[in-house]
Amino acid sequence: MKDIKLVATDMDGTLLNSKGELNPAIYPILATLKAHGIRFVAASGRQYFNLQKQFEPVKDDVIFVAENGSYVVYQNQELYVQPLQREIVDSLILTSRPISNAYPIFCGKKKAYVENTEPAFWAQLTKYFERYELVENLLDVADDECLKVSICDLDGSAANSYPHFKAWEDEIKVKVSAGIWLDLSHNLANKGKAMNVLQQLHGISAAETMVFGDYLNDLEMMQQAYFSYAMDNAHPDIKEAARFRAESNDENGVAKVLEQLIAELTMVKN
């Protein structure tokens, strides 16, 4: 691991515990990685502004891969943006409306837009989005790029809403990103593509990259790194795709592997 130059981790189910909390112990670890010249990436389906808030004390040291790879930002500078075509966005919204207990979100660069205040849905929205707006009709949203359409499916996205969008898979990315979330984004928008952009930008190879993930929206990211870690609580497909295993998110698995990395780097330095 002594040649690692880039570390990326998913958030929910990976770096965050089951309560959605970030362990403050990660801050000194990030400082040590920075001192060794290693870049740190937070890669998530979450909104950029939400991710930035999670890392507020060290936000200038973190590269943010937001909205499942549609939006990459470092120190408020956009490194990669891959929005959906508007006609596709409108079709996806229309497809979602007849689905029971499924609520579409227009995930814009400026903010997220929703058209429903169902309490259970609203609780999920405010958990993952920092900037949002209630509108009468998502089809009327203007003056913003759509990074992805997210479906909050309170009946379970894999069984309830995914079948309605399966036919779109040749045209866009259709990702079950968690139990009640379905993410619909551009074919060139995924965490793996975002990692490739960063690797090309900084001249970093897959052999010099370490990634952590737990769910299906992490699959492409796993393929961009030799040091690919599936959390102990990960989806079976992620465990199969990853070369290594980390302890669960509730056991601070990411931090423990990074501490091993730091120990090896310190040994080499000495």
Image (cartoon, rainbow, N blue to C red):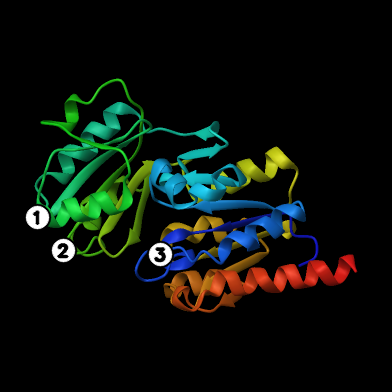
Q: Report the mark closest to the observer, 2 or 3.
A: 3
Identity, as a three-letter code, of the amino acid under mark 3: Glu
Q: CA distance from mark 2 to mark 3?
A: 25 Å
Query: Is there any visible trace of residue 147 in the rendered image?
Result: yes
Could you tell me which residue is drawn at 53 percent across and 79 percent down? 247
Q: Secondary structure at mark 1?
A: loop
Circle 1 sits on which residue? 100
Mark 1 against mark 3, which lies toward the viewer?
3
Instruction: Describe the element under mark 2 as helix, strand or loop.
Output: loop
How far separated are the C-alphas under marks 1 and 3?
A: 30 Å
Q: Are marks 2 and 3 in contact (CB under 8 Å)?
A: no
Secondary structure, mark 3, is loop
In the displayed image of the protein, which residue is found farthest to the top?
143
- The picture quadrant where one finds residue 243 is bottom right
Which numbered dot is residue 155?
2
**Residue, x 9% and y 55% (percent of image)?**
100
| Count of marks placed on residues | 3
Of the two numbered discs 2 and 3 on the same chain, state the one appearing first in sequence.
3
Q: Quadrant of residue 144?
A: top left
Which one is earlier in the sequence, the residue at label 1 or at label 3? 3
The amino acid type of the residue labelled 2 equals: Asp
Question: Percent from the top left, x then y, of residue 10?
Answer: 49, 59
The residue that disc 3 covers is 21
Tell me which label, 2 or 1, sits earlier in the chain.
1
Q: Nearer the viewer, residue 186 or 71?
A: 71
- Image x and y of residue 254, in percent: 56, 69
Q: Is residue 38 left or right of 189 when viewed as pictured?
A: right
In front here: 177 or 127? 127
Determine whether label 2 and label 1 are within 8 Å by CB.
yes
Graded by Cα atoms within 10 Å as few (under 14), some (14 to 19) or many (20 or more), the crowding at tag 1 reads: few
